[in-house]
C-alpha cells in the first residue's frame, strides 16, 4: 500500500480556501495504493537567484517532498487570469539550481476551482506552459474547470453528489497517468 506518494500543491494560502477543500476531498476518490500530502508553501521566501547556492530550509524541505513523491497534484485558484504568485514562487524555488530541479519527470495533474464561470481555465493553461518548460508530463484530459456552487461539497467535506461522477472519472484518469509515468 502507499505505493504512490503524491505531493499536492495548493495555490491558495487562504484559511477557508475552496481549492484546499477540493484537495482534501478529491483524495478520498483515489485507490488505497495512493497516499497524498499537501506541501507547505506559505513559508517560502520570495525567490532570489542569489540564494541558489544556499537555499532556505523551507526550500530544501519542499524539494525533498517533491523528489520523494511519485506524482504531483496542483490544485489552484486563478488570480487575474493566471496562477497565484505564491504558486509560481514555489515552482521556481523547486526548479533551481539549474540542473537540479525537483520537478523533472514527475507526472502531474491540475485541478482548480474559482468563483468565475471559466473555473480557473486560464490559470491552468498558464500553469501547463510552465510545467512544459520543467519537463513535467501533465495530464491533458479530462480537464477540470470547477466553479464554486452550493453542493460542490457535502457537509462532511466530501465531493457533493452532483460532481462526484465527473471528479471520480478525473481521479481515475490521473491515477492511470501517474502509474504510466512514475519512475
Ligand atoms: C487577487 C485575486 C484575483 C482573482 N482573479 C480571478 C480570476 O482571474 N478568475 C477567477 O475566476 N477568479 C478570480 N478571483 C476569485 C477567486 O476565484 C476566488 O477568490 C477563489 O475563492 C480563490 O480560491 P481559494 O478559495 O482557493 O482561495 C480572484 C481573487 C483574487 C484574490
Image: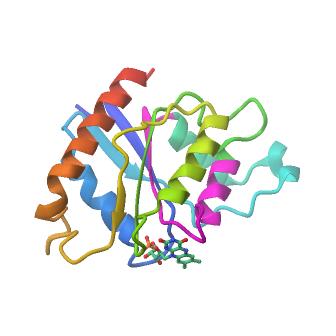
Q: Is 20 positioned to the left or the right of 46 in the image?
A: left
In the rendered picture of this protein, how many numbered marks are placed on residues?
0
Is residue 70 a member of the stretch shown in magenta?
yes
Q: Is 141 positioned to the left or the right of 83 in the image?
A: left
Question: Where's residue 160, x and y in %?
Answer: 15, 65
What residue occupies the far left of the structure in this picture?
161
Question: In the displayed structure, would residue 45 be above or below residue 124?
Answer: below
Question: Where's residue 110, x and y in %?
Answer: 43, 48
What residue occupies the far right of the structure in this picture?
50
Is residue 175 a member of the stretch shown in magenta?
no
Question: In the displayed structure, would residue 176 be above or below residue 24?
Answer: above
Q: Quadrant of residue 79?
A: bottom right
Q: In which quadrant of the rendered image does the C terminus lie?
A: top left
Q: In which quadrant of the rendered image does the N terminus lie?
A: top left
What residue occupies the far front of the structure in this picture?
117
Nearest to the observer: residue 150 or residue 100: 150
| Colouring style | rainbow
Nearest to the observer: residue 39 or residue 79: 79
Q: Residue at x 76, y 57 (%)?
A: 47
The magenta-colored residue range is: 68-92
Question: Where's residue 100, x and y in %?
Answer: 71, 32
Question: Where's residue 11, x and y in %?
Answer: 51, 62
Question: In the displayed structure, would residue 6 be above or below residue 12?
Answer: above
Q: Can residue 40 be seen here? A: no
Q: Can residue 130 be seen here? A: yes
Nearest to the observer: residue 35 or residue 144: 144
Q: Residue at x 51, y 53 (%)?
A: 124
Q: Residue at x 33, y 42 (%)?
A: 142
Q: Residue at x 43, y 37 (%)?
A: 140
Amino acid at each position: 500500500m502507499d505505493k504512490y506518494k503524491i505531493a499536492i500543491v495548493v495555490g491558495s494560502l487562504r484559511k477557508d480556501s475552496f481549492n484546499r477543500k477540493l484537495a482534501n476531498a478529491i483524495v478520498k476518490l483515489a485507490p488505497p495504493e495512493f497516499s497524498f500530502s499537501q506541501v507547505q508553501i506559505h513559508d517560502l521566501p520570495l525567490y532570489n537567484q542569489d540564494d541558489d547556492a544556499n537555499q532556505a530550509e523551507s526550500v530544501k524541505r519542499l524539494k525533498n517532498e517533491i523528489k520523494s513523491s511519485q506524482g504531483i497534484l496542483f490544485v489552484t485558484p486563478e488570480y487575474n487570469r493566471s496562477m497565484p504568485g505564491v504558486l509560481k514562487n514555489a515552482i521556481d524555488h523547486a526548479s533551481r539550481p539549474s540542473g537540479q530541479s525537483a520537478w523533472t519527470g514527475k507526472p502531474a495533474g491540475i485541478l482548480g476551482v474559482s468563483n468565475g464561470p471559466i473555473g480557473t481555465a486560464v490559470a491552468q493553461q498558464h500553469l501547463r506552459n510552465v510545467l512544459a518548460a520543467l519537463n513535467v508530463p501533465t495530464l491533458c484530459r479530462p480537464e477540470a474547470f470547477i466553479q464554486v456552487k452550493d453542493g460542490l461539497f457535502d457537509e462532511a467535506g466530501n465531493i457533493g453528489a452532483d460532481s462526484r461522477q465527473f471528479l471520480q472519472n478525473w481521479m481515475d484518469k490521473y491515477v492511470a497517468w501517474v502509474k504510466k509515468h512514475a519512475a
